[in-house]
Amino acid sequence: MKIYSKIDKGVVRQSNQDAFLAGEISPTVSFAVVCDGMGGANAGNIASETAIKCISEYLLKSYRENMTNDDIEKLINNAIISANIEVFEKASKNEELKGMGTTAVVAVINNGIGIIANVGDSRIYLVNGNLTQLTTDHSVVQSLLESGKISVQDARVHPEKNVITRALGAESNVVADSSQLALQQDDTLLLCTDGLTNF
């Protein structure tokens, strides 16, 4: 298992509201988490950093040897719920952080099985000669695409293309989408924010 990570604030913004962490839970289990914060001033940074810390700590502390893939999927979902509570409570207690939130994508690799989850419009792709999107965005544009109201071409330039419909910390409860897939020897999982997918 090889893990690479890179962050770049790009040329538009002064600060970077993205955060990530990746590593090993055990010799056969690896994880990665990517978050893209939203909110004024430093609120987006705080949301994404809080979520990264909460999700990764939850995974590392709660993982047990011999967990099934279904157990790990529940573990990831519980980690996301825990992070949502933490971000939501921080925003509720501090006027300057009100309205902050973050996207989240999480992947845990257990003996060749990828267990993934997402909230918002950060994505996970499978790279194996092709690039296959594994997650579905929680966004206004995705809803319009699914209902047939706009085309893929329209989606790329839609004025609300950055408006998400689900985020950690935006409400007291959040539901992540999660799934499992078998990975082959040379497969790569790419976790990224919309800063990369838009580019």
Image (cartoon, rainbow, N blue to C red):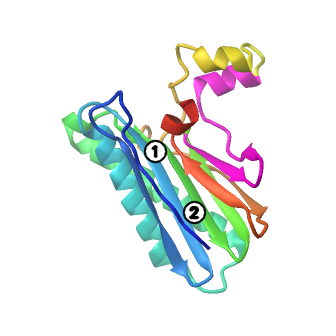
Assign the C terminus to one quadrant of the image: top right
**Left or right: 4 as drawn, with respect to 186:** left
Whether residue 128 is visible, yes or no, is yes
Q: Earlier in the sequence, mark 1 or mark 2?
A: 2
- Classify mark 2: residues with Cα within 10 Å, few (<14), some (14-19) or many (20+): many
Q: Quadrant of residue 8?
A: top left
Circles 1 and 2: CB distance less than 8 Å?
no
Which residue, given by chain and number where applicable, does mark 1 sit on? Answer: 168
Residue under numbered circle 2: 76
Query: In what quadrant of the picture does the N terminus appear?
Result: bottom right
Residue 60 or residue 128, whichever sits in front: 128
At x 65%, y 57%, the residue is 189
Q: Left or right of 118: which side holds 13?
A: left
* Magenta stretch in the rendered image: 122-146
Whether 87 is drawn above or below 60: the answer is above
Residue 162: image location, x then y, percent: 50, 25
**Three-letter residue code for mark 1:** Leu
